[in-house]
Amino acid sequence: MVEERRLRGRFRPPSLSWVAARVLEVVGASPGRRSLDCCQPSQKPPQIGSGTPARGVGAVQENVAASTQNQALAAILFLYDKVLGEPLDRVEGVVRARRPKRIPTVLSREETERVFAQLEGVPLLICQLLYGSGLRLNEALSLRIKDLDFARREISIKEAKGGKDRVTMLPEPSVMPLKAHVESVRAQHQQDLRRGLGRVQLPNALGRKYPNAERQWSWQWVFPAASHFVEQESGIRYRYHVHPTVVQKAVSAAAARAKVSKHVTPHVLRHSFATHLLENGYDIRTVQELLGHASVKTTQVYTHVLNRGGLGVRSPLESLGSFNNAPRRPLH
């Protein structure tokens, strides 16, 4: 199953997530397995009849999100169709969940400044790129040295969501701190090279095409992790980028210290980037391109905060002089 997904360009390192656990349950694999590698085409797939996937997925009973339900169902269909070669007939009783429409959380400029005031170090630099350049968290963490163009004040995002590349701005206030950070990363890389390390994993098959590229400075992570890891297949020690939870925990703690009552995550800074650009008068097509949205309909969700109040409608309560001018009665 892993090889099939890698060929289709949709491979992610398998882990025992909720989806993986449900797929293993449906195919009758041992609960102790830690991945989907056990699902081989040579195995005879269990017969699935009416209602079986619904019992195996158990999405309603376990109260998981609609996207997780659909992911589990798609994984089961993919397993039987593409891996085991036994495509399922129509199974009754399985309904695809509908994702509810959510309005994104957006910080005001004052709230954004308060959160930034509580951040420091690498998490602060990363959050500046999320808010100042509109990057997703994984896009910021996956940046390599070659993706930064200080002269043109540009950031190149490679293989972003949907496998697309794009270019966005490098905010001026981040240039000097980022340059200083890059120099510290260079010193760390030089020290790794002296120790016989200094390798980073390369995308796709570039490691075979350019055998020495994994040690080259241009391919190093902009935000490297503090330690190395050993790849199981080759036994080589690599340095990965900062883990997303480092930034997520830092942002959550900063929002709490800043006394921001909203649910603040790193992705909220990207929402705020788009909303504040639209408030500044930039057209929605430009914002769409900077965000990397395939459709302008996705970007239109940010227009909800451009209007005053709900949908830009002025409440009739505001037109009553008795409420606008009269002294307020104390509440009991």
Image (spheres, rainbow, N blue to C red):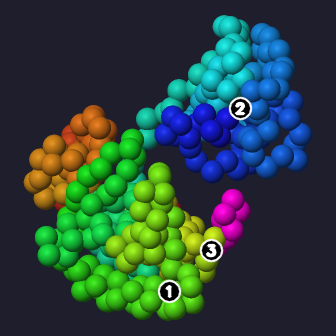
Q: Which residue matches tag 2?
A: 59
Mark 1: which amino acid? Leu
- Return the disc, 3 or 1, that comes first in the chain's sequence: 1
Extent of the magenta region: 229-235
| Whole-number angstrom distance, CA of label 2 to CA of label 3 | 39 Å
Give the dominant element type of the magenta stretch: helix, strand or loop: loop
- Do the residues bearing badges 3 and 1 touch, measured as CB atoms within 8 Å? no
Is residue 308 visible to us here? no
- Return the disc, 2 or 3, that comes first in the chain's sequence: 2
Instruction: Give the camera-side residue of 77 and 119.
Output: 77
Q: Which residue matches tag 3?
A: 237
- Return the disc, 1 or 2, that comes first in the chain's sequence: 2
Instruction: Give the camera-side residue of 272 and 2.
Output: 2
| Whole-number angstrom distance, CA of label 1 to CA of label 2 | 49 Å
Indicate whether 49 appears above or below 303. above
Q: Residues within 10 Å of mark 3 (few under 14, many from 20)?
A: some
* Residue visible at 45% across and 75% down in the picture: 215
Q: Which residue matches tag 1?
A: 193
Mark 3: which amino acid? Arg
Where residue 275 appears, as percent x and y from the top left, is 25, 54
Where residue 282 appears, as percent x and y from the top left, is 12, 53
Indicate whether 269 appears above or below 84. below
In the image, is 263 to the left or to the right of 29?
left
Where residue 286 appears, as percent x and y from the top left, is 15, 49
Instruction: Give the camera-side residue of 313 and 256.
Output: 256
Indicate whether 40 appears above or below 332. above
Tell whether position 202 is magenta.
Answer: no
